[in-house]
Amino acid sequence: MIQSINPYTGEKIYEFQELSDEEIINHIEFVNQAFLDWKRTSFAYRKELMEKAATILKEKAHEYGRVIAEEMGKPIKQAIAEVEKCAWVCTYYAQNAEGFLENEYIKTDAFKSYVSYEPLGAILAVMPWNYPFWQVFRFAAPALMVGNTALLKHASNVMKCAELIEEVFTLAGFPKDVFKSLTIKSDKVEQIIKNPLVKAVTLTGSKPAGSKVASVAASEIKKSVLELGGNNAFIVLKDADIERAVKVAVNARYQNTGQSCIAAKRLLLQEEIASEFLTQYVNAVKSTKSGNPLDEDTYIGVMAREDLAEELEEQVQKSVEMGAKILCGGKRDKAYFEPTVLANVKKDMPVFKEETFGPVIAVVTFKTIEDAIELSNNSEFGLGVSVFTEDITKIRGYIKEFDEGAVFINDMVKSDPRLPFGGIKISGFGRELSHHGIKEFVNIKTVYIH
Ligand code: NDP
């Protein structure tokens, strides 16, 4: 059985029967069978269904948000906002997929030559629990609009969300098995990737999981897309609008109780403004409201699993032993971790070197913009960075110096259906969202007519 444990109450709330190997094989065959019809449907038809999915998500945002809050501890307001954002990505691809996938005519020696973008088949998505709806929809909306079909292996602690996501597509009128959630643990992923009917795989999660999935895919000569987290810096230069930077930096680190790949994990402050910034920042962090994820005014919930909170506690404790100073927070109670600010952080401490996947920020000061870039790039990860400054002309000259998938000036790093999302280094490869994302799982077919 696969269980969902409410991390706030510690109670078991759902239980699911794991699929047998035979059932897994059958489902893959059904999803492949569904592909053979789905790929021939028109964009107009797919668009109608995807827009219906968006409507259902909007109508049921409160109901689904509650399940997210109960299964992984996200504060209810943020959970509802997540479901509403899924409606946005569905609408975005419903309206734009056809244009993105139009034939691309290229002048050559031929009478006519062009590129035709065509679906591949059943795509496997291995997804995490931190944004249990969003991570799935940002894959599924473009994949289905292309004409692919989808198999979901969701994280084991959010299988009710997986069931509800499948419900969205069913209620929207998608043909049976165009989208199928598999109730399985991670040990079944390898055999699914190796099934000849599965054409490619995408994973969002940790480096070990990504490494394993990409290796299996590579051994079968199948494409993979990996989105594996980050250790984003949030840089505040001395000429920044401090009040706004403080506000955004709180949200950039603590929303979703810090469990986000693009969260600001390292706060880099220019020496001249460090003390003023930190006083305001610590006050703002202390005034965030922790509590029951189901309360409307809760901003910090609990972490999704107690073991994840324990791991974070270890990273903090080790860093404190090495000289980091707790300015606020630092304590854990089961899956709850106090919003924490750590100063005097050095490059060799776990809170600087490793991804901290919870409400903890590591503060480092720097002298020059060059020092800030060196600190920011001093990471195995390369997902994104935020820089706050009033001198846009000057900072634009430095953008190419950042080894990142995204550079955000005067805002937090965030995902937007219109912009590509993904990283370099061990943050992964490939892109989601925008016209780049929809072309990850297509056959880029060259057509040459003499
Ligand atoms: P995992 O990477 O273990 O889980 C993510 C998904 O991958 C889940 O569906 C999981 O299934 C599956 N998975 C895990 N191991 C394998 C494997 N060997 N083969 C195939 N699939 C696998 O993340 P955790 O939940 O353990 O979180 C640990 C850390 O991962 C976090 O602290 C954070 O650093 C990072 N992470 C990053 C995310 C991001 O947004 N980039 C999201 C979540 C986590 P199952 O649940 O059944 O194990």
Image (tube, grey):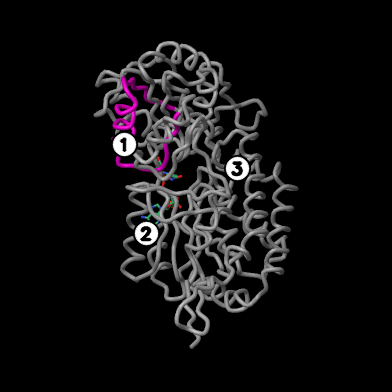
Label 3 neighbour load within 10 Å: few <14, some 14-19, many 20+: many
The residue where tag 3 is placed is: 68
Q: Which residues are magenta?
A: 360-387
In the rendered structure, the answer to whether residue 44 lies left or right of residue 260 reads: right
Q: Is residue 382 above or below residue 104?
A: above
Residue 288 image point, x, y percent: 56, 20
Seen at 58% across and 27% down, the residue is 299
Mark 2 vs mark 3, CA separation in Å: 26 Å
Q: Looking at the image, how many numbered discs can be counted on the residues?
A: 3
Mark 2 vs mark 1, CA separation in Å: 26 Å
**Mark 2: which secondary structure?**
helix
Q: Nearer the viewer, residue 115 or 79?
A: 115
Q: Tag 1 or tag 3, which sits nearer the N-term?
A: 3
The residue where tag 2 is placed is: 213
Seen at 51% across and 23% down, the residue is 245
Residue 58 image point, x, y percent: 72, 47
Tell me where residue 82 sits by quadrant: top right
Label 2 neighbour load within 10 Å: few <14, some 14-19, many 20+: many
Q: Is residue 308 above or below residue 359?
A: below
Mark 3 vs mark 1, CA separation in Å: 34 Å
Q: From where the camera sits, is residue 199 visible?
A: yes
Residue 233 image point, x, y percent: 39, 32
Q: Nearer the viewer, residue 386 or 364?
A: 386
Q: Is residue 270 above or below residue 24?
A: above
Seen at 48% across and 65% down, the residue is 441
Q: Nearer the viewer, residue 216 or 419?
A: 419
Task: Judge: label 2 CB < 8 Å from ligand 1.
Answer: yes
Label 2–label 1 contact, CB within 8 A: no
The residue where tag 1 is placed is: 377
> Which is in the foreground here, disc 2 or disc 1?
1
Query: Hey, what amino acid is under mark 3?
Result: Ile
> Which is in the foreground here, disc 2 or disc 3?
2
